[in-house]
Amino acid sequence: MVTGNLLIVIFIASLLLLFFLILKAKLEPFISLIGVAFLTALAVGFPIDEVSQIVAGGFGDTLVSVGILIGLGVIFGQFLAASGAVEKIAQAIINVFGARKSPTGIALTGTVVSIPVYFDAAFVILSRLVKSLAIKTKIPAVTFVIALAIGLIVSHSTIIPTPGPMIVAENTGSDLGLFIIYGLVIAIAATLVGGYLYGMYIGKTMKVDEDLEIEEAEKPTYKKEISTGLSFFILGLPILLIVGNTVTQMLAPGTTFATIFTFIGDKNVALFISVIVAIIVLRPYIAQDYDKLYSESINSAGIILLITGAGGAFGAVINESGIGDHLINVMQVWNIHIFLLAFIFTQILRASLGSATVALVTTSSILGPQAAELGVSPVLLGLAICVGAIGLSLPNDSGFWVVNKFGNLTIPQTLKAWTLGGFIAGLTGLAMVYILYLLSPILPGI
């Protein structure tokens, strides 16, 4: 097995090869990802008889997590769009925030939704809303894609009760209440800068997706007009079920009610229930043939599943190679401020391992116990770790491909919009940590 700095060289080389295959050789992302995963596994020295197992295991583990979710999510979004519900919700957001500020609305919506709902689930559920808002406001779709995605990943990385931030709070010995309060402050700032402001900026430099122009020209018809209230109810149903699970586990653990919600509040079951409800309740509003809706949904989900699974396979190879452990050893000798070290530490692990949650758990387990010894606020140290997990999503992260495909972006657009946008949001979060640090003499608990 390869060890030391050569692991980092192999990791960088594998990314460069992947970009070359997709961007220059025009090879399909699924084939490119699987091929690079095999080559990387061989390059780091995995036994030949284990290479296929590691790649297949990473592919399977990723689809175990998001496979059903993506399939159901595409069908759910298709029925919402066909009934006119997405248009109604988009119009409601425009009415509240105005057309020009509607990206702010979708960004803050993402921030709130991702507190109880996983990033992938929330993005899939709300992705149809992005298209409708772009058509109605004439604002480029990429602006809404990034506003939503950044809002979601910021909450996913910083706000309890999401598992990653919860573990960080525990490992640093932070007060949970203070962690939530200051986490919300940081999350809102990071979302507005990385999601809204940066999203608006790049929206001016990227061409509106051709699919949106086609959809706008088609002007779909409906049997009758759906109400705004019913539209929000259908969209929010899976979110309400998932949140219900979280709330009942916190307030009434061990009860029959909590046990029931453990099942119906599972992300896959919640979305399945929502799909069934949508199929039944939205029928009076849908003019399209149901068979056609199913067929279009399955065709769309197929390529997304393949590419997302392949991204997980590549990420598994990187994870198993020991790159993360080597980076930990290297960074522990750096003589820099603890908050900045925590941020850089988590960012590099996020980029190399392809998982925000793994990066948070790993970093907090190492740096968390040092808070008392260094005399720094455990809350601020924990939040510095959390904001480090926001950015630098690369092709070894399945979320990269979810944003890429559901956002109708090219690979360069995904890197410029999603990867860099997340990094900017993370830097904003770090700046907020230091602002809170400077204000700590007058702030309670830190």
Image (tube, rainbow, N blue to C red):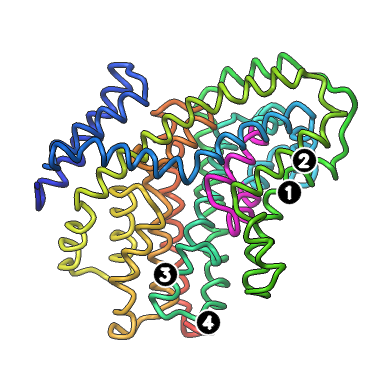
- Looking at the picture, does residue 57 appear above or below residue 289? below
Q: How far apart are marks 2 and 1 (CA)?
A: 9 Å
Image x and y of residue 159, in percent: 53, 64
Residue indicated by mark 4: 443
Q: What element carries label 2?
A: helix
Q: Is mark 3 on a helix, strand or loop?
A: helix
**Quadrant housing residue 53:** top left
Magenta highlight range:
107-130
Residue indicated by mark 1: 237
Q: Which of marks 4 and 3 is nearer the N terminus?
A: 3
Q: Which of marks 2 and 1 is in front?
A: 2
Q: Distance between the residues labelled 4 and 3?
A: 21 Å
Q: Earlier in the sequence, mark 2 or mark 1?
A: 1
Q: Which of marks 3 and 2 is nearer the N terminus?
A: 3
Pointer 3 local density, CA inside 10 Å: few below 14, some 14–19, many at least 20: many
Residue indicated by mark 3: 168
Of 173 and 373, nearer the camera is 173
Residue indicated by mark 2: 277
**Residue type at numbered disc 1:** Leu
Q: Which of marks 2 and 4 is nearer the N terminus?
A: 2
**Residue type at numbered disc 3:** Val
Pointer 4 local density, CA inside 10 Å: few below 14, some 14–19, many at least 20: few
